[in-house]
Amino acid sequence: MRPAALCHAWHMKNWLIRFATMLVFNIAVLLLIVLLVPGVRGAWGVLWGGVILTLATMWIKPLLTRMFTNHAQRKSARMSRLGLKSLNALFVFLVALIVWVLTVLLSQIHVSGFFFGWILPPVALLLGWFIYDAVDDKLEAQANRLYDSATGAAKHDAPAAPAPPAAPAPRVVKDDGLTDEQRRMFDDLG
């Protein structure tokens, strides 16, 4: 394989592992929401809802977060510190609410009631995102080991594949609204 092809395969593997670990985690979060929140119902729709939630979390959440963060920065000169913190908290909740609405509309998850159907589940998503951000590196490392053992990549006595290209210098972008995991994902895509 050419070095460019190896690099592309390495990036694709990392992206697939991130997607798979986030999908499993999101399905677990959706199952907990369906089981514990009285206004949310779903059976097999939770699996498709997990796919929708994962895609929305990976692609739409960073865009919305960046948009809302830029808006808050423009308003920051005219706001008190408490007002700015409140605005940021509102924007974080709005991102979770939009992702939740997309998940409900595009899957077979059914909601009823304003608080238990539309307010509490986004709060649960926020909690899930917080937990995922705390454990994602460990989950991805374990998934990499499982992937390598399943494909036999770790057992081959063939010469080792060249090391992945050195990571580019970290971007110095303050308050872009992305988590470290999302920045790594975008960096891996090119």
Image (cartoon, rainbow, N blue to C red):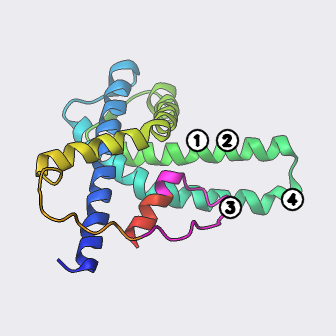
Which residue is tagged 1?
93
Label 1 vs label 4: CA separation? 22 Å
Q: Residues within 10 Å of mark 2 (few under 14, many from 20)?
A: few
- Determine whether label 3 and label 4 are within 8 Å by CB: no
SS state under label 2 = helix
Q: Could you tell which of marks 1 and 4 lies nearer the N-terminus?
A: 4
The residue labelled by disc 3 is: 174
The kind of residue tagged 2 is: Ala
Using the image, tell me which numbered label, if any, was put on residue 23: none
The residue labelled by disc 2 is 89
Instruction: Using the numbered discs, state the Cα–Cα distance from disc 4 to disc 2 in whole angstroms.
Output: 17 Å
Q: Earlier in the sequence, mark 4 or mark 2?
A: 4
| Span colored in magenta | 166-182
Q: Which mark is residue 77?
A: 4
N-term-proximal mark, 3 vs 4: 4
Magenta: main secondary structure: loop
Q: Amino acid at mark 3?
A: Lys
User: Disc 3 vs disc 4: which is toward the camera?
Assistant: 3
User: For this rendering, which residue is in front, 109 or 19?
Assistant: 19
Q: Are marks 2 and 3 in contact (CB under 8 Å)?
A: no
Q: Marks 3/4: CA distance? A: 17 Å
Query: Does the residue at mark 1 contact the one at mark 4 (Cβ under 8 Å)?
Result: no
Q: Is residue 77 above or below residue 146?
A: below
**Considering the image in quadrants, where does the N terminus appear?**
bottom left
